[in-house]
Image (spheres, rainbow, N blue to C red):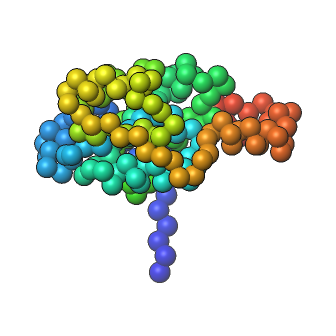
Amino acid sequence: MAHSVSLPRSVPLIPCLYTVDTLVAAIGAAPQDWRPLVFTNGCFDLIHAGHVRYLAAARALGKRLVVGLNSDRSVAALKPKRPIIPEQQRAEVLAGLRSVDAVVLFSDRTATALIEVLQPEIYVKGGDYQLETLPEAAAVQRYGGRIELIQVEVPSSTTAIVQRILELYGEESLGTWSPQNPP
């Protein structure tokens, strides 16, 4: 017999979405369950296979994977006309991935402050980054953390996906849609 459960539309259930304080408390309460901690960060605007494989590879490097997710404000500061998907929805999609143990939103342009607080043993970014140009590298190196650059198996990007959609359907078909006014 099937059971139907009705969830309030205004309260999404995102069990592994943390604030910085609740994440620090969870790690502090049971470090043996979290460390070695793996951390990565990004906008994760349109999740694609490259993201999924990258996050799975990152998770395999330690006990738990924490994803620092750029807030809508920080994405907008980094990338014009973005984000496409609002932060709460991006967080929910990330939290739903098997490889992700925790998601924490941050509003800065870089994850440096978050890294300084969490001090993950392993900081991971995609292979399209270089150590010399990685803004968070100095913070990780200061406390003796390890930096891993993972080659993305499926070369894709949100920008390329958006460009392909525009090529197929044209900008005029987008109408008045915006992240603040989704369908």
Q: Is residue 179 above or below residue 168?
A: above
Give the side of residue 91 with respect to residue 164, left or right. left
Residue 106 seen in render: no
Measuring from the top left, give residue 119's x and y in whole percent: 23, 32
Nearest to the observer: residue 34 or residue 22: 34
Q: Is residue 127 above or below residue 50?
A: above
Measuring from the top left, give residue 93's x and y in whole percent: 50, 48
Q: Quadrant of the C terminus?
A: top right
The residue that appears at 32% across and 46% down in the rendered structure is 65
Give the side of residue 17 with respect to residue 32, left or right. right
The residue that appears at 46% across and 20% down in the rendered structure is 109
Q: Is residue 58 above or below residue 19?
A: below
| Number of residue marks | 0
Residue 161 seen in render: yes
Measuring from the top left, give residue 134's x and y in whole percent: 42, 26
Nearest to the observer: residue 133 or residue 170: 133
Q: Quadrant of residue 121?
A: top left
Q: Is residue 44 above or below residue 13?
A: above
The residue that appears at 48% across and 33% down in the rendered structure is 129
Q: Quadrant of residue 150?
A: top left
